[in-house]
Amino acid sequence: MFKRLQAVAPLLPLTEVGLAGLLFVSALRFLIGEIYSRTASASLVSQLTANGFEISPNLPGFVQPSAVTTDIAWMGLVIGLPLLALFLGRVHILMIPAALLLAVGRILMGGDGSVVSHLLGAELAVGGGLFYLALLIRNRGTHVPYFFVLGFVGDQILRAWGNTLDPTWSLQSTRGLLYLTQTTGIHVLFILVGVFVVLALINGLRGRKTTAMAAGDIDPNNGVLTFWGGIGLGAMLFLQLSLLATPNAVTGRADADYTIFVPLLIAATALPLVPWVRQTARNMIAPFEAGTRGWIWLIGIVLLVVVGTRLTRISLPAGLGSFPVGATTLVIAQVGISLVWWWLVRPKPPRGFNLSGLWLVIGTLIFALFVGADLFTYEYAFVRPLAAPFDQLNNIVLPILRGFRGLGLGVILLAVLFSLMPMIQSTNRIPWRNGPASQTLLGIVFVVIAAGAGAYLSRPPAIITTTNQSELRIGTYNIHGGYSEFYQFNMQAIANTIRGGGADVMLLQEVERGRLTSYGVDETLWLARELGMDIRFFATNEGLQGLAVLSRVPIVFDDGVLLPSIDQQTGLQRVQISDQPNAFITIYNTSLGLLIEGIDITEQESNQRQQLEAILDTIAVHVQNDYGGQLGRAILGGTFHNVPDSPLLQELTRTGFVDPFAGSNLELSATIRRVGLTTRWDYLWIWSQSLRSTGTVVMSDSTASDHRLAVVGVQVRRDQ
């Protein structure tokens, strides 16, 4: 029966493998964000408890430090599951329980968390996926590339549907295809898992795949993952999740249009499935000496990544606009990297041990190290001295971790080097092979369908515009990377807070466009599409972290400058909106440096003064060069990380900007309501010579972020 079914549907094994890859990739992406949020929450709880504060366990995201110890124990257990393949790898039927563990974990990950936490569900899914992969290498080695390529293609399509937030993850609603809700996302998850389990049972019971061979030939399905193959696998996973298989990360770093490059990146990921593409790549490198092929491929990928992340656009002649060279070269780099999946696993020689499970564990640890390095390229400013008895290491550890500032590209290039090591070390084979014309045709059809689905699902909704109003509501909101005070990630709560504030224009700070620790979500794009608003983003750190402005009023211009920063890099964003014909309002959005305990406060305050001076100097240059010597209608807002009566902000009041909240009761105007701290750090200053405030409000009941949303009503013109 199984043989007849296989004859009718020869693609069943590849479909099973592709669904396994999708469930694994989706769970792995979720797992990174969940570990970060729970660890950060437990660290904050520990710090506040040590300072004598009582914390309600009912606060969103609250995690006991002891729970993180349990999380780490489970993580070590599930990462070690591939080691079972060292002894049981030839037992093909074990792929069924491995598949079931992956499926059950993925279902629990998307549940309500009442039975099993989302993190434990993700850990079980990742552990099951790793065990499944270890068995796949041993028994169906030729299918391993399809596990990853189809998995990442499916992940890109799901995230395009949810506007970069996978709708099968959680209870947050999302707007995607026909404005489907999260309920539909869960239904899709059950369908995917159900089909995967059925196919895993069919193919598992059918037995191990064998290939007819002449005497002395090596069975290509009896695969082996070498040491360098494991290293390359870990680095490849990091590259895909942090950049090349994440369209919003590509367009964020390269400052390109997300909607255009979603289908292009899906096509780039899937193209190696076409045998003709693999044969073309083989023809490109075959003429070179065996020992140089991998190095040549490495140099090409490195050049593409450097150009893609450093050169965004080039101007075209004859007024034809500009060409997004950065994102285009990253798409080409993705084709080259996606082809490397075929080099990770090689046929096992007749003699010798198969240590694939061990090297797979090593590769997972390499992936974790890259994720940690990427974390500190953003979090370098928040590194704290180690407590006793490890305080003697501070002179070594602190400079290293803080030295990750500006090294985002360096981490990526190191991952490229590690990814290409299996190709560099393999000098006697080229695994890229052509296939029958039917396979090429089928591959092309799949690429076209997948890219078409991405194009359809990623199309932008209509923007609800507001024009010709006598009064506008301007808001400022530090969204803390999408996290609450105790690091619960909830973009829907952020959107609901903004919607409840009723602002026509929103200034956002601490916004992220695809960091691993924020679940790979482009928060600017997701919020803009959820709220029906236009968006402009200004990157201050590695292209994926910075400032943003949401607006219902048409945006006609935007730019920005970086500010002098001794801690986390910040900047000043300028956006001009046109509320009526031939007239505009200039919005300045910023976030000053932090005042952190344990670091010289004098130096930090001096840095804030330098930043404020740079802001005022920049505005003065704009007045001189762009505004005809008069500032006109202007608003300066954002997070200033200082209290209203500080000398810094008192100095700002003498420039002509007015604080509409000045003199307000702190209980009504506080934008910081944390455990043990109530104050105001977020401000909206209006230019007194051209604008007048009509009222103020702070959304004090929202705990979606560790800041509160503040709104000012502004009279922008007098009714005729």
Image (cartoon, rainbow, N blue to C red):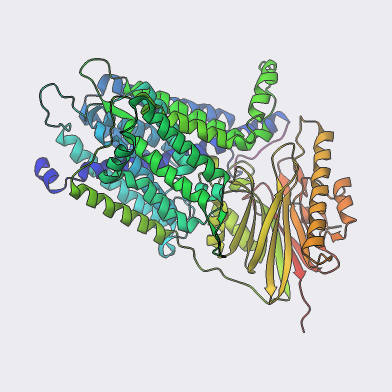
Q: Give coordinates of residue 215: x percent, y percent.
A: 10, 23
Q: Quadrant of residue 467?
A: bottom right
Q: Give coordinates of residue 118: x percent, y percent.
A: 46, 40
Q: How many marks?
A: 0
Q: Which residue occupies the foreground of this view, 39 or 226?
A: 226
Is residue 75 in view? no
Q: Quadrant of residue 25?
A: top left
Quadrant, the C terminus: bottom right
Q: Residue furthest right?
A: 654
Quadrant, the N terminus: top left
Horizontal side of residue 404 vs 29, given as left or right: right
Residue at point 42% right, 26% down?
231
Horizontal side of residue 607 vs 378, given as left or right: right
Magenta segment boundaries in residue numbering: 52-58
Q: Give coordinates of residue 141: x percent, y percent.
A: 25, 31
Q: Which residue occupies the foreground of this view, 12 or 340?
A: 340
Q: Is residue 53 magenta?
A: yes
Q: Which residue occupies the foreground of this view, 281 or 497?
A: 281
Q: Residue furthest bottom?
A: 720
Horizontal side of residue 293 vs 137, given as left or right: right
Residue 131, above or below 502: above
Residue at point 80% right, 40% down?
607
Residue at point 32% right, 40% down?
281
Residue 171, above or below 123: below
Is residue 692 in view? yes
Horizontal side of residue 613 vs 213, given as left or right: right
Residue 501, above or below 109: below
Q: Give coordinates of residue 439: x percent, y percent.
A: 21, 47
Residue at point 81% right, 59% down?
661
Question: For the stretch drawn in magenta, what is the main secondary structure?
Answer: loop
Q: Is residue 451 magenta?
A: no
